[in-house]
Amino acid sequence: MGDRRVIGLVCGVVAGISYGTNPLFAKPLLLSGVPVLVMLLFRYGISAALLGLWMALSKEKFSVRKREIGLLMLLGVLFGGSSLFLFASYAFIPSGLATTLVYLYPVFVALIMVLLRFYPSWQTWLSIVATFGGIILLSSPSQGAEIRPAGIILAVMSALSYAFYLVIVNRSKRIKHVSEHTLTLYALVTGAILFAVIRCFQGGSLTEGIDSAADWGNLLGLAVVPTMISMLTLAVSSRFIGPTKTSVLGVFEPLTAILIGTFMFGEPMTWKMGVGIAVCVGAVIFMIVKPGTSAQSD
């Protein structure tokens, strides 16, 4: 159990850091004029192809039971929907506020687990509150920014989608014996199909804005690091240490994104952001050092 906990914690940190590299690859693509849906389509599609190739070379089985397919597809819709809702919210509210609202997902995970009669320890609850406070410091919207209700709703839906994804991966007995590779592959394929269908209804070329080798390189990076690596380690972490603790470790996502913005794109680092980073890291360390015990904990 000790080894599983260490592996779960490490995977949770890797999942957060890898997902936080989104701006490193996505920002150049957006500047090149690649639409969000096109970016998400290739992000999931390339990732699914690479993971499928890896599984084939490793001679891992692709087959699942019929009763598992529907739930695996639902996971793909939830994970893909989380990305889609987040990007859509940017059109209505500042990205900093959207980031703050999306980081409600640890709270949603904890509440869902309580409904399932699995109770996070007080140390975990304290870590959730502290990390959320840190995120508010990191992502405070600028003065006078326009805030529209549609953006708030979309950001909260993104958080809910992500929360349900984590809980289902951890708690569903139906897919308990499905490997992390197979689970992630089906989720990626479903997400790619979802984005392709929406793009077709939206209209426009499926390769719009992808004009150079650099664009394809960024799409490859987007598919490998913040998608395939993140989803695989997220599944392992959720199964090994539970969805609540995994969601708290997700704080490394905005931390990584902010550091990339500061050092790679010259974005400003304020004292509030520095304090927010310190609070978040301190809360995670507290959760790891003081895990707490509970009769029915996650």
Image (cartoon, helix red, strand yellow):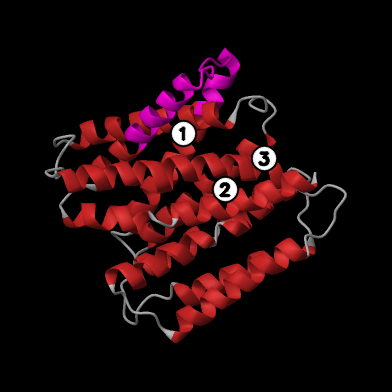
Q: Earlier in the sequence, mark 3 or mark 1?
A: 1
Q: Position of residue 109 (x, y in %)?
A: 63, 51
Choose mark 3 or mark 2, whichever is in front. Answer: 3
Disc 3 from disc 1: Cα separation: 17 Å
- The amino acid sitting under disc 2 is Ala
- The amino acid sitting under disc 1 is Gly
Name which residue lies at 34% across and 46% down.
Answer: 222
The numbered dot on residue 76 is: 1
Local SS, label 1:
helix
Q: Residues within 10 Å of mark 3 (few under 14, many from 20)?
A: many
- Which residue is at the far front? 57
Name which residue lies at 41% across and 69% down.
Answer: 259
Q: Which residue is mark 2?
A: 163
Query: Is residue 134 shown to the viewer in this render?
Result: yes
Q: Which residue is mark 3?
A: 239
Q: Earlier in the sequence, mark 3 or mark 2?
A: 2
> Viewed as shown, does residue 142 lie left or right of 16?
left
Name which residue lies at 38% across and 30% down.
Answer: 50
Name which residue lies at 73% across and 44% down.
Answer: 4
Q: Which residues are magenta?
A: 44-72
Q: Earlier in the sequence, mark 2 or mark 1?
A: 1
Residue 206: within the magenta? Answer: no
The numbered dot on residue 240 is: none
Q: Quadrant of residue 190?
A: top left
- The amino acid sitting under disc 3 is Arg
Q: Quadrant where the N terminus lies?
A: top right
Position above or below: 103 against 56: below
- Which residue is at the far left? 211
Q: Residues within 10 Å of mark 1 (few under 14, many from 20)?
A: many
Residue situated in front as seen by the camera: 198 or 220: 220
